[in-house]
Image (cartoon, grey):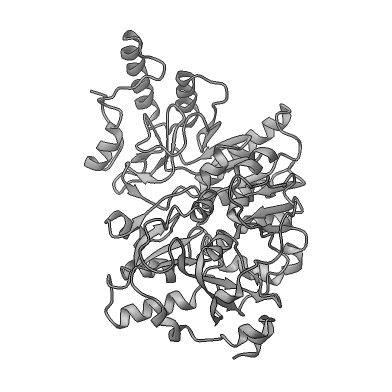
Amino acid sequence: MSAALKSRVHRASLLKKVAKAEDLIPLFQNGQYLGWSGFTGVGYPKEIPVALANHVEKNNLQGKLKFNLFVGASTGAETENRWAKLDMIDHRYPHQVGKDIQKGINEGRIRFSDQHLSMFPQNLMYGFYTKDKTTGEPGKLDYTIVEATEIMEDGSLVLGASVGATPELVSQASKIIIEVNTKLPSFYGLHDVVHHVDPPLRLPYLVNRVDSRIGQPTLSIDTDKVVAIIESQKPDNTGPNAPEDDTTLRIANNLIDFLKSEVSAKRLPKHLLPLQSGIGNISNAIIGGMAKAEGFEHITVFTEVLQDTFLDFFDQGKLDFASATSIRLSPEGFEKFYANWDKYTRDKILLRPQQVSNAPEIIRRLGVIAMNTPVELDIYGHANSTLVNASRMINGLGGSADFLRNAKLSIMHTPSARPSKTDPTGISCIVPMCSHVDHTEHDLDVFVTEQGVADLRGLSPRDRAREIINKCAHPDYKPMLTEYLRLAEQICLKKGAGHEPHLLHAVFKMHLNLEKNGTMKVDNWN
């Protein structure tokens, strides 16, 4: 037992349960229900998942030792993505990232259930996901494996760079294994942990400011459930951020100009309202652009995930406080974060369970400005965030709908076009009808591309279509989409069905042409 581990575990009785990951392999059986801590590739267990993967690979158990895996969101590639490659996952809930796990899902080997991230923890507590379980303790997860950065004298856990669904996963576990990561600093003081309460006894979350604390700094657990303590010294395996390019910068500048115009029109206060930003290079460019732009000061954030450019926002002295459920930085970002720990953490950041960070009640109360990236948008204001050409799953819905359905301003930003294998602008991100709908026209207010901004607030469907085509469509597709709308109006208005006109015989012609010819560019709408 290392001195570092002894210094992090303050409950003496738990030191008697210190073990090595390899010694615990016999605990795990085919078909078990496992919970992991973690959210967006940080705060997840590393030792046990890697040891199990090594065991399967060494003994040729691919497809013979499979688990039902529950995590707040995604984890590191060396864990769930490797598990997918080794055919170790039967069911997966509620969000994932990785080429091999996506391949397993789309080949039908992994049964993936895509869920709103705010609803996943409560549905777990309701027993929705374990109702058909036939082995082990009924209605419970067999094991939950948690990464902690410290264990307090009362047995409660100091989590790491994420909270996610860990409180609920621990509560629903028959047994708990704790990985204490001594590579990382103790995150004590950065968390605000609350526990699930079932209806009808549930009370409001009394968060009326982004820095409101309503819970405890540690996660209380039943220490009698703990079967082992493992020392980990592996960092969170995050990758580099995609670099900004001309398109993402133009999108960011268009969105920033729009927010400034809303302030000028007095529809937003000078310091805006709390910001939510999704994950990816566009989101990074927007937050980075706001950090550099004139006129934005005393900004607050109420979001899921903090990325590298939020550190720049703090560095500029323009960001006062950020509430999230995860700090997901690049390796360089984490190095900077840990080197300036007091600067970034002292009364600046709070990490909450995803039931709270994504709570519709709080999002609506605070008047959050939500900004997310879709797969595609359609001319009437619907959005697809999950499925390419209606069928191929990417990552999942995540928390985008939690925010977009409840924000004061719901904004979706995307390039107007993306390259296909044969055409630099072969995929239009504006289409007549989304091939799959995650967000309806009733939930979205503003679309932003590098071409411009479509403000959809208060517009009827046909007016929305013109606004979106004229302001956001790529020049290669604008005439094509304009002609589609003209024909659809001509035909549908004539037969008295023109509220939201569509040509059913042609509505997915762009998608079909992409599959057949490698481009969404069509010659006509016949």
Q: Is residue 486 visible?
A: yes
Location of residue 385 by image quarter? top left
Picture coordinates of residue 132 (x, y %)? 36, 57
Where 412 sits versus 526, above or below? Answer: below
Q: Residue at x 59, y 52 (%)?
A: 355
Snapshot quadrant of residue 484: top left
Q: Position of residue 13 (x, y in %)?
A: 64, 85
What residue is drawn where x is 70% and y is 29%?
A: 267
Residue 140 point in image, percent of width and height: 46, 63
Tell me residue 170's x, y (percent): 55, 66
Question: At 36% from the left edge and 15% from the top edge, which residue is drawn?
Answer: 489
Total number of numbered discs in the rendering: 0
Taking the image as shown, residue 276 lies to the left or right of residue 487, namely: right
Relative to the observer, which residue lies in front, 450 or 63? 63
Front-lying residue, 98 or 164: 164
User: Which quadrant, please, contains the C terminus?
Assistant: top left
* Image quarter (top left, top right, bottom left or bottom right) of the N terminus: bottom right
Q: In this view of the protein, which residue sits in the foreground, 94 or 223?
A: 223
Instruction: Between residue 201 and residue 345, name the one nearer to us.
Output: 201
Q: In the image, is 260 to the left or to the right of 479? A: right
Query: Residue 250: in sight, yes or no?
Result: no
Q: Is residue 84 left or right of residue 235?
A: left
Question: Residue at the spot x=48%, y=19% of the render?
Answer: 463
